[in-house]
Amino acid sequence: MSEEKTCPRCGETKPIEEFAINNTTPKKIYRKRHCKICYQKLWEERKLIRQSAPPPPEDSICQCCGKEKKLKLDHITDTLIFRGWICNECNIGIGLLGDRLEGLQLAMNYLNKVNYES
C-alpha cells in the first residue's frame, strides 16, 4: 500500500506522488502541502492578484507593524482580494490566527488577561 496525503485545499486524499517534492528542504524529502493540481491553481491565483495589486511601497514599510522590512503581498484567502503589503512575520501571524478578525480578537483577549495581571 502506498503512502497517501490529504490536500487541505481540495480535501482529497491522494497518493503521495500527487504532491510535489519541496526542494527547499535539502536533507529530507518533504512534500508540498497541496496536491500538484491545487498547487498550480494557487500559483495562477497569486499571479492574478499580483497583476491587479498596486506596486509595493518604495519605503518597504510594513502596513501592519510599521517596520521597514521586505514586503509580501497580502490577500484575503477566500476571495483573493488584495489587502496590502506586509512583512513575512505579520503575514504568518495573521495566517496562524485564522486570517480573520475573530482570531486576532481571541489573541488580544488572551494577552489582555494574562500579560497584564502580573
Image (spheres, helix red, strand yellow):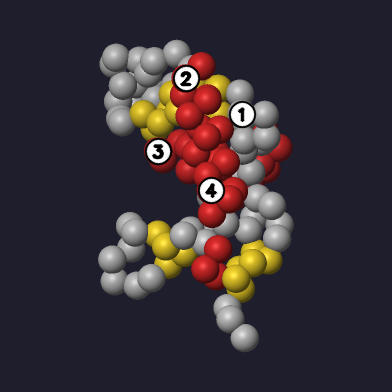
Foreground: disc 3 or disc 1: 1
Label 1 neighbour load within 10 Å: few <14, some 14-19, many 20+: few
Q: What residue do we see at 40% from left, 59% from top?
A: 22
The image position of residue 97, as x and y in percent, is 60, 44
The image position of residue 96, as x and y in percent, is 56, 47
The image position of residue 116, as x and y in percent, is 55, 43
Q: Nearer the viewer, residue 27 or 87?
A: 27
Secondary element under disc 4, as helix, strand or loop, is helix
Res 16 label: none
- Where is mark 1, residue-wise? 80
Res 88 label: 3
Q: Is residue 117 left or right of residue 29?
A: right
Which sits earlier in the primary sequence, circle 2 or circle 4? 4
- Where is mark 4, residue-wise? 39
Foreground: disc 3 or disc 2: 2
Gap in angstroms between the C-alphas marked 4 and 1: 15 Å
The image position of residue 103, as x and y in percent, is 66, 41
Q: What residue do we see at 47% from left, 20% from top?
A: 51
Check disc 4 and give the amino acid type.
Tyr
Secondary element under disc 1, as helix, strand or loop, is loop
Label 2 neighbour load within 10 Å: few <14, some 14-19, many 20+: few
Foreground: disc 4 or disc 1: 4
Label 3 neighbour load within 10 Å: few <14, some 14-19, many 20+: some
Which sits earlier in the primary sequence, circle 4 or circle 1? 4
Secondary element under disc 2, as helix, strand or loop, is helix
Q: Is residue 105 visible?
A: no
Which sits earlier in the primary sequence, circle 3 or circle 1? 1
Q: Are marks 3 and 4 in contact (CB under 8 Å)?
A: no
- Where is mark 2, residue-wise? 51
Which sits earlier in the primary sequence, circle 3 or circle 4? 4
Gap in angstroms between the C-alphas marked 3 and 2: 20 Å
Q: Are marks 3 and 1 in contact (CB under 8 Å)?
A: no
